[in-house]
């Protein structure tokens, strides 16, 4: 939380375009992380009979997709 506050404090002095670019970069990172989590879920499912970790990876991926949408929504408001 504190890192986020200080990060946006530093960005507030930049142009709207710079802020949009930073948020876009965050959005891409979240989307990429979601893809990695889905890949991990696929590998884990193939290697093990336990579904708990696979389900956790999928939940994490869905959460990352939500973060992607959140950053994109903020960008559209700027």
Image (spheres, rainbow, N blue to C red):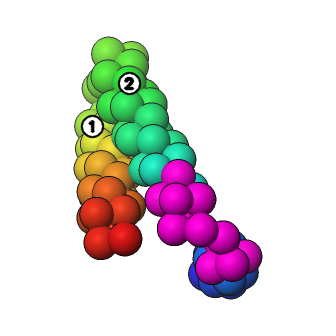
Task: Give the distance between the C-alpha atoms of the residues marked 2 and 1, in whole angstroms.
Answer: 15 Å
Instruction: Choose between 11 and 36: the one closer to the eye.
Output: 11
Q: Residue at x 30, y 72 (%)?
A: 77
For image coordinates 32% across by 16% down, the residue present is 46
* Quadrant of image for the C terminus: bottom left
Which residue is drawn at the image coordinates 28% and 42% (left, top)?
A: 58
Q: Position of residue 47 (x, y in %)?
A: 39, 17
Q: Nearer the viewer, residue 21 or 8?
A: 21
Principal secondary structure, stretch drawn in magenta: helix
Q: Nearer the viewer, residue 30 or 60?
A: 30
Res. 64 in view? yes
Residue at the top extreme of this rendering: 46
Whether residue 3 is situated above or below residue 34 in the rendered picture: below
**Residue 5 coordinates in the image, percent (x, y):** 64, 83
Q: Is residue 77 magenta?
A: no
The circle drawn on residue 59 is none
Along the line of sight, which residue is nearer the eye, 16 or 49? Answer: 16
For residue 74, which quarter of the picture?
bottom left
- Name the residue tied to disc 1: 51
User: Around disc 1, counting alpha carbons within 10 Å, would you say few (fewer than 14), some (14 to 19), or many (20 or more)?
Assistant: few
Which residues make up the magenta segment? Answer: 10-21
Tell me the SS state at disc 1.
Answer: loop
Please tell me which residue is depicted at 32% across the width and 57% down the height of the picture. Answer: 72
- Whether residue 8 sits left or right of residue 39 in the image: it is right
Residue 23 in view of the camera: no
Q: Which residue is label 2 attached to?
A: 39
Q: Is residue 18 left or right of residue 78?
A: right
């Amino acid at each position: 939380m504190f890192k986020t506050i200080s990060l946006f404090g530093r960005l507030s002095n930049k142009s709207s375009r710079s802020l949009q670019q930073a948020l876009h970069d965050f959005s891409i990172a979240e989307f990429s992380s979601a893809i990695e989590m889905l890949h991990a879920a696929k590998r884990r499912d193939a290697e093990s009979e336990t579904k708990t970790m696979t389900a956790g990876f999928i939940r994490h991926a869905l959460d990352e997709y939500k973060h992607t949408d959140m950053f994109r929504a903020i960008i559209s408001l700027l």
